[in-house]
Image: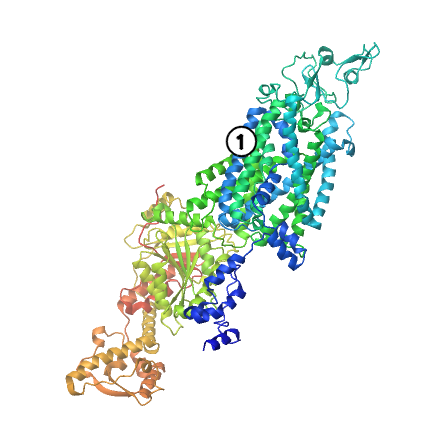
């Protein structure tokens, strides 16, 4: 038998087919191993064999987990795609890296960059050692706290492609993830532009100045010419780098270690130069006129005159300030009055220079860099020409500018998390490697700041482009053995960083595009056959070109600082949020974190954004906000178990508990709607206009629950209920109704509606108003439930103290696209309902469909009422309510009941009796037969105690099952007066016959079926004569008289109104008159296009107080 089972497992007809449900698709389940394990499962786990398709064995799950690889869509994956299958498998095993190679060195390469080599000396010279130290500590503290938060998130599971984007999106949701992910992408792209601009600056300023295409004729035009050169060469370099990335990122990957070696060697040369400066300072003289620093581009000797062959001759410096080379030439006044001094630019670490460079020395744009400790005789002419050979500042400097320029030098901490798929133990390597890299770079930055201030003269530090030291790179003057070590090293370092940015940014965009949360970016998820993001690379190059067109490294740096700071801020927020919510899935292996540290890091990031540039910060936030709202409204819905959902749940729970403390105040009352809709056989809503009217009434405010009822059992109809919910949700989206949907399966429609009314909502967030449509064809329907259901809803809402709105002629109500340019909303205030009739038109007029409609209020005055005073009082009442409306009092005097009213009432009652004769439902017929049967039993026992045996058919036979047992008889006691029970004038007591008037009859199944058909057949002439001999009930006559008179007045006054609202009278307490109640409402609303019947919930909903 076991063998048979095993053969069956392998065959076509085995349990593999199961119930036809597809197997679960998961990276943690190895399908081949599940198949292999089924033999074992069939022998020993037969109790669970039917669940194997959806619930695999633990052994299979663990095997899949052990073999699961989660390589990101990064450099390694694309590089491996170019090789064959066998080679790729070997590479996957061989490329697993440890902490040093996988995290530490990549972070070092991304953190050390262009700012260290080109701007850090200038930051020290302008800000001083103290403020520069504070800037470095502030920025490094920000990144360290962010790294701690990132380590907690990164060790809380596997981080695939996308790095920071993945962490934020899965922690804060697709809206935040998409917004911050795109900001991070923009930051990475602008970082590429900054590195390319740094490369061009090094090339044209320090390596090959002769390559400049645009040459300045005057010194004042040098800045503009330099910008144009940066744009041209930057575009060329960007094109070349993009082509390299497009051809294959494996070349970028191979040269990464070379670029990293250049960075490390350059830094080591700085420390070597500092040590050498203490013993033998390098010779970099600086020429100073008075206290003004001179540029060495145009002269060679730092002197006015010099002696050659015992003859005094003028120097090139003389010719720059004087009209000729002769001694008696006319010279610049400041040149004549001040001496020329030559200082050593690099005095060395033992010179005691550190005290002079402790404090800041901020300068305005176009100001000469001056030495504060040298004497100077000012000239009478204060204006200085830019053509004179001084060292001028190119921009106004201040503390916040230094922060914005410096901060990009501490970015790049995400490099390790982006490579999580390439690590042997990502959850161990990422925290250790990232924190070690930040600690190392922070130590380097702090030490170099102190060493620069101790070794380099202040005027040289403030000379951004090294004009005072023969055009050398300032940091290069300190290096050993040669300044070219720094120049070449920084050139290749910036080239490598630019290539890394152009490699990483398109893959980040590709990860966002493939998630599908931003619809218009989906095209950028495609690429070459091996997965290279071609279209994303093209977009990245175009955005990078905008940064290059800015052509200033100092202007681009604050831009990318904004985007990186925003990304880091949300990483801290994600960690803090997950920690505070204590979600069950929050189990990071990295334990050294706390939510206070995350909040501190988030506060630092936000503060640094506004410190760097408040207007850039606002622009970045606006961009992120627009992306957030776009994803919220148009993006794909994603459920990632993010922290925002958990936060929303906690906030909702807190708010619901607060709402439980007491009912809402009248000032806060608004209709919280339960909309009852019907669905057809295809689970589509029959009257979508109900949801249209809901949208117009609610305008997205408050609670809206759309409920529908399906008849049957839940086990058989749960799929139909799901389809009905999906259909209603789609319609709610189309009609822009913000709310919830609930489909209930019940044995009958009445019970289902009752369940919805009683149980919808949660805690204090429950509906207080029920909205439904009027049954249009209730008169023509054979099923009395069509009108009995609505009457029961009226009774239940009254018992539950809920307001009720019944829309009549709902198909004639306007759509959301229509606009009423004029017209009236008429309110017929007949009885006080708590103010519902006043509030509803006010809410409707907030919507654009009804906005231009005016409001009119009609009330009814009886004979004893003073109509003039009523109008004054109502006008004052509306004034206090702050509601603008026209007021009219309609006088209704007592009048005789017309013949038309009698005739209408008589027709109504005759119709009701005919319905009782012709349209008895199955349940009512069974109850009638059962009551007669029960009544007969007592009579038989009294008359024939020995023959009291009564043979009754089964319930199925009573329902029409006579085909199965045609010979079986049913003995019943039939009332003689059964044929005359249609007389309406008899009271219930008169309708019950005495026991003595009953006769014994035997009915066969055929007779019973024939009686049913007889009841359904035409009415006999005798019955018709009985019906016409009826006299109408006086209570019904009075009610019909009221309905007719009110309808006449309403039609006369409000026939042209766009909408009529009036009080809905309550149903009769005696249920025998339910069908008459429906007729009264029909008469009351006859001749009106759009009517909203309103019934209050028994409480005040509007107040005159503030």
Q: Is residue 228 above or below residue 467?
A: below
Which residue is the site of mark 1? 137
Identity of the residue furthest to the bottom in this view: 967
Q: Residue at x 58, y 32 (%)?
A: 444
> Secondary structure under badge 1?
helix
Q: Is residue 548 above or below residue 660?
A: above
Q: Nearer the viewer, residue 329 or 815?
A: 329
Q: Is residue 227 above or below residue 999?
A: above
Q: Quadrant of the C terminus?
A: top left
Identity of the residue furthest to the front in this view: 279
Rendering colour mode: rainbow
Q: Position of residue 103 (x, y in %)?
A: 57, 43
Q: Where is residue 293, by image quadrant?
A: top right
Q: Position of residue 391 (x, y in %)?
A: 70, 22
Q: Is residue 178 left or right of residue 1068?
A: right
Q: Nearer the viewer, residue 207 or 238?
A: 207
Q: Position of residue 151 (x, y in %)?
A: 51, 43
Q: Is residue 342 left or right of residue 776?
A: right
Residue 871 visible somewhere in the drawing:
no
Q: Residue at x 52, y 37 (%)?
A: 144
Q: How many marks?
A: 1
Q: Nearer the viewer, residue 851 or 237?
A: 237
Residue 644 visible somewhere in the drawing:
yes
Q: Quadrant of the N terminus?
A: bottom left
Rate crowding at label 1 as few (under 14), some (14 to 19) or many (20 or more) other CA atoms within 10 Å.
some
Q: Is residue 153 above or below residue 440?
A: below
């Amino acid at each position: 038998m076991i063998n048979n089972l095993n053969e069956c497992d392998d065959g076509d007809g085995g349990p593999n087919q199961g119930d036809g449900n597809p197997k679960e698709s998961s990276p943690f389940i190895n399908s081949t191993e599940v198949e292999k394990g089924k033999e074992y499962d069939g022998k020993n786990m037969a109790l669970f064999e039917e669940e194997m398709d959806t619930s695999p064995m633990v052994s299979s799950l663990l095997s899949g987990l052990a073999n699961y690889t989660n390589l990101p869509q990064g450099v390694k994956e694309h590089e491996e795609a170019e090789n064959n299958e066998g080679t790729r498998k070997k590479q996957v095993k061989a490329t697993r890296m440890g902490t040093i190679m996988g995290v530490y060195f990549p972070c070092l390469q991304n953190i050390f960059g262009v700012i260290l080599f080109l701007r850090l000396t200038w930051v020290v010279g302008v800000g001083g050692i103290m403020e520069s130290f504070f800037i470095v500590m502030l920025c490094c503290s920000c990144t360290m706290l962010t790294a701690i938060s990132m380590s907690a998130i990164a060790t809380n599971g596997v981080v695939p492609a996308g790095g920071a984007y993945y962490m934020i999106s899965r922690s804060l949701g697709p809206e935040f993830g998409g917004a911050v992910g795109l900001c991070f992408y923009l930051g990475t792209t602008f970082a590429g532009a900054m590195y390319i601009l740094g490369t061009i600056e090094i090339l044209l300023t320090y390596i090959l100045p002769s390559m400049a295409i645009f040459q300045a004729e005057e010194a004042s035009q040098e800045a503009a010419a330099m910008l144009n050169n940066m744009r041209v060469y930057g575009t060329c370099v960007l094109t070349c780098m993009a082509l390299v990335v497009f051809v294959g990122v494996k070349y970028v990957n191979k040269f990464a270690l070379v670029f990293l070696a250049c960075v490390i060697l350059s830094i080591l040369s700085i420390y070597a130069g500092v040590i050498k400066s203490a013993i033998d300072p390098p010779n970099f003289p600086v020429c100073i006129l008075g206290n003004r620093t001179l540029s060495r581009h145009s002269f060679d000797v730092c002197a006015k005159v010099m002696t050659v062959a015992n003859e005094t001759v003028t120097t090139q410096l003389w010719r720059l300030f004087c009209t000729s080379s002769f001694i008696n030439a006319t010279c610049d006044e400041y040149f004549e009055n001040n001496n020329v001094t030559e200082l050593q630019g690099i005095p060395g670490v033992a010179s005691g220079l550190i005290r002079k460079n402790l404090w800041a020395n901020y300068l305005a744009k176009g100001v000469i860099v001056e030495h504060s400790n040298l004497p100077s005789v000012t000239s009478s002419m204060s204006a200085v020409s830019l053509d004179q050979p001084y060292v001028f500042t190119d921009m106004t400097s201040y503390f916040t500018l230094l922060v914005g320029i410096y901060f990009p030098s501490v970015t790049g901490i995400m490099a390790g998390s982006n490579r999580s798929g390439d690590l042997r133990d990502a959850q161990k390597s990422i925290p250790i490697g990232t924190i070690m890299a930040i600690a190392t770079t922070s130590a380097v930055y702090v030490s170099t700041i102190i060493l620069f201030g101790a070794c380099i003269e202040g005027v040289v530090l403030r000379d951004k482009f090294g004009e005072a030291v023969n055009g050398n790179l300032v940091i290069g003057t300190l290096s050993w053995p040669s300044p070219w070590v720094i120049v070449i090293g920084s050139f290749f370092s910036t080239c490598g960083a630019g290539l890394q940015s152009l490699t990483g940014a398109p893959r980040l965009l590709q990860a966002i595009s493939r998630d599908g949360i931003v619809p218009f970016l989906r095209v950028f998820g495609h690429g070459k056959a091996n997965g290279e993001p071609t279209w994303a690379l093209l977009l990245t190059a175009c955005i990078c070109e905008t940064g290059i067109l800015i052509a200033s490294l100092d202007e681009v740096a604050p831009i990318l600082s904004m985007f990186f700071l925003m990304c880091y801020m949300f990483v801290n927020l994600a960690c803090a949020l997950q920690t505070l919510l204590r979600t069950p899935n929050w189990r990071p292996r990295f334990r050294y974190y706390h939510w206070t540290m995350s909040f501190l890091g988030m506060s630092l990031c936000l503060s640094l954004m506004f410190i760097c540039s408040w207007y850039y910060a606002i622009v970045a936030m606006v961009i992120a906000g627009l992306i957030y709202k776009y994803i919220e409204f148009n993006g794909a819905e994603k459920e990632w178990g993010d922290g925002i959902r958990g936060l929303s749940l906690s906030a909702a729970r807190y708010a619901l508990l607060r709402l439980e403390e007491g009912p809402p105040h009248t000032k806060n009352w608004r209709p919280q709607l339960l909309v009852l809709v019907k669905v057809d056989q295809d689970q589509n809503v029959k009257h979508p206009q109900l949801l249209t009217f809901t949208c117009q009434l609610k305008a997205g405010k408050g609670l809206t629950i759309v409920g529908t009822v399906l008849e049957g059992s839940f086990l058989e109809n749960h799929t139909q209920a799901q389809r009905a919910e999906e259909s209603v949700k789609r319609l709610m989206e189309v009609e822009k109704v913000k709310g919830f949907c609930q489909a209930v399966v019940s044995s009958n429609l009445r019970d289902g509606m009752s369940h919805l009314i009683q149980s919808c909502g949660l805690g204090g967030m429950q509906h207080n108003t029920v909205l439904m449509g009027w049954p249009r064809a209730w008169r023509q329907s054979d099923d009395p439930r069509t009108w009995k259901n609505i009457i029961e809803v009226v009774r239940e809402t009254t018992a539950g103290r809920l307001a009720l709105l019944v829309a009549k002629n709902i198909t004639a109500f306007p759509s959301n696209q229509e606009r009423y340019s004029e017209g009236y909303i008429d309110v017929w205030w007949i009885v006080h309902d708590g103010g519902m009739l006043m509030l509803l038109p006010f809410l409707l007029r907030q919507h654009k469909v009804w906005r231009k409609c005016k409001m009119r209020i009609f009330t009814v005055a009886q004979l004893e009422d003073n109509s003039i005073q009523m109008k004054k009082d109502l006008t004052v009442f509306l004034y206090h309510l702050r509601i603008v409306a026209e007021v009219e009092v309609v006088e209704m005097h007592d009048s005789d009941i017309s013949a038309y009213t009698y005739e209408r009432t008589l027709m109504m009652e005759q119709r009701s009796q005919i319905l009782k004769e012709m349209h008895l439902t199955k349940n009512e017929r069974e109850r009638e037969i059962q009551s007669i049967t029960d009544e007969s039993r007592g009579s038989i026992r009294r008359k024939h105690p020995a023959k009291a045996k009564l043979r009754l058919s089964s319930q199925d036979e009573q329902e029409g099952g006579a085909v199965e047992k045609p010979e079986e008889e049913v003995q019943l006691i039939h009332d003689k007066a059964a044929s005359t029970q249609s007389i309406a004038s008899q009271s219930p007591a008169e309708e019950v016959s005495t026991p003595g008037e009953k006769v014994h009859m035997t009915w066969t199944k055929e007779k019973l079926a024939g009686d049913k058909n007889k009841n359904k057949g035409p009415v006999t002439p005798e019955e018709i004569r009985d019906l016409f001999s009826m006299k109408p009930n006086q209570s019904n006559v009075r009610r019909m008289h009221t309905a007719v008179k009110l309808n006449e007045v309403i039609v006369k006054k409000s026939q042209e109104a766009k909408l009529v609202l009036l009080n809905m009278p309550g149903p009769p307490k005696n249920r025998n008159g339910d069908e008459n109640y429906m007729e009264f409402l029909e008469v009351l609303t006859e001749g009106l296009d759009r009517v909203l019947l309103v019934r209050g919930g028994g409480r005040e909903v509007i107040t005159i107080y503030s």
